Amino acid sequence: GESVGLHLPTLSVQEGDNSIINCAYSNSASDYFIWYKQESGKGPQFIIDIRSNMDKRQGQRVTVLLNKTVKHLSLQIAATQPGDSAVYFCAERPPLASKLTFGTGTRLQVTL
Amino acid sequence: NAGVMQNPRHLVRRRGQEARLRCSPMKGHSHVYWYRQLPEEGLKFMVYLQKENIIDESGMPKERFSAEFPKEGPSILRIQQVVRGDSAAYFCASSPGLRTRPSHEQYFGPGTRLTVT
């Protein structure tokens, strides 16, 4: 069935280094892919999205890459800060649907 | 500019009681979604509503769960005769509407953490 999954459940990164969080998806027809950040006890916070007809999109300190050939999505965070510590979810919107399908999440731990 | 509001933030119910979770979307948003999250897991879609209409309830359990989004007031997720397995965080999200379908940008509230004892 359709699924969005992540390769690494936990990622530890030193402060100042770059972080890369990966996600694999299975529905090649999805038209949007979104990254969310969820801090403990809070709701998911929208970070960045990318449309299926793009392969790269940049935001403030974040970049999302989409590789449709291998159905892979990644989130790059530059100069990772302690405030980036959270669980990161990728999500996809299947075609003709309004709901989002979420992956299981990657916990990012920033060490000093 | 207030974000998505949910209340209560924490709710404790005994088995067999009813739980009512409320969600007020962001100003200007006409589409509401409910998701459930178990500990250490991703969010699972439950239901998508517009004002006075249920558009997609494919993620809702067939029994005991219902949702509404009346013309006036917040969206309500209602769970009757709660069981321990209903314990989870329930998140509401809202999005603005486009001409043909809602935007993919969904903004989430802080969630309601339901504990069934």
Image (cartoon, helix red, strand yellow):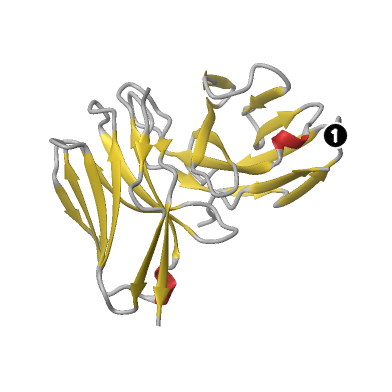
Q: Position of residue A48 (x, y in %)?
A: 30, 52
Query: Can residue B28 be seen?
Result: yes
Q: Is residue A87 above or below residue B14?
A: below
Q: Is residue A64 above or below residue A95?
A: below
Q: Which residue is mark 1?
A: B15
A7 left or right, relative to B41:
left
Q: Outermost residue, bottom direction?
A: A112
Task: Classify the position of the C terminus of chain B by image quarter.
Answer: top right
Badge 1: few (under 14), some or many (20 or more) residues near its Cα, within 10 Å? some
Q: Between residues B36 and B111, which one lies in front from this camera angle?
A: B36
Amino acid type at mark 1: Arg
Please tell me which residue is depicted at 71% across the width and 34% down the height of the picture.
B85
Q: Between residues A109 and B35, which one lies in front from this camera angle?
A: A109
Query: Can residue B104 be seen?
Result: no
Q: Is residue B99 above or below residue B73?
A: above
Q: Position of residue A75 (x, y in %)?
A: 27, 55
Q: Is residue A14 above or below residue A38?
A: below
Q: Position of residue A14 (x, y in %)?
A: 33, 77
B60 left or right, relative to B115:
left
Q: Which chain letter goes with mark 1?
A: B
